[in-house]
Amino acid sequence: MYTLDTNTIIYYSKDDSNVEIFLENIFSQNIPIYISVITEIELLGFSNLTDQDIEWFENFLKTLTIIPVESRIARIAGMLRRKYRVKTMDSVIASTALITGTTLVTRNINDFKKIPGLLLKKI
């Protein structure tokens, strides 16, 4: 099971071959894929999105399980932010992966590598 960082979805939308191969393999095996609601905000919050981009993201998001920020995730994210000096958005994404017991798929390993117990997959 996997949690996708925002950059993974962005690279997938840009037809990055490494991400395509990895995600298509997961999809073919029907493995659960999660994202934090923070990723949803980040994806749909870019100011230069076209209508086509928005439609692509909206359709892709329908294939995932979106995890809301609830108190348990917020408390873990707060601890990660405080203890490991992780950015707020990244701390929520990391705590989502920790709570769901999934591997976080990201291109930005350095943003997360200091968090103990967090499984990472670089794409």
Image (spheres, rainbow, N blue to C red):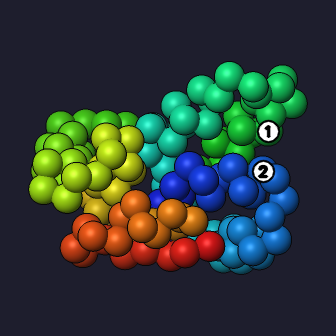
Q: Label 2's element?
A: helix
22 w.r.t. 68: above or below? below
Q: Nearer the viewer, mark 2 or mark 1?
A: 2
Instruction: Pick the quarter of the image with the C terminus.
Output: bottom right
8 w.r.t. 67: above or below? below
Left or right of 15: which side holds 64?
A: left
Residue 55, by quadrant, is: top right
| Residue 102 horizontal/vertical position (percent) | 39, 68
Which residue is more in the foreground, 64 or 52? 52
Which residue is more in the foreground, 56 or 31? 56
User: Which residue: 60% across, 26% down?
Assistant: 45
Between marks 2 and 1, how big is the CA–CA gap?
8 Å
Q: Please say whether residue 29 is visible from this viewpoint.
A: yes
The answer to whether marks 2 and 1 mark residues whose Cβ atoms lie closer than 8 Å is yes
Total numbered labels:
2
Which residue is more in the foreground, 61 or 45? 45
User: Which residue: 36% across, 64% down?
Assistant: 112
Q: Residues within 10 Å of mark 2 (few under 14, many from 20)?
A: some
Q: Amino acid at mark 1?
A: Trp
| Residue 96 horizontal/vertical position (percent) | 34, 53
| Residue 16 horizontal/vertical position (percent) | 80, 64
The residue carrying mark 1 is 56
Q: Residues within 10 Å of mark 1 (few under 14, many from 20)?
A: few
Which residue is more in the foreground, 85 or 61? 85
User: Which residue: 38% across, 49% down?
Assistant: 90
Q: Please say whether residue 32 is visible from this viewpoint.
A: no
Q: Amino acid at mark 2?
A: Ser
The residue carrying mark 2 is 13
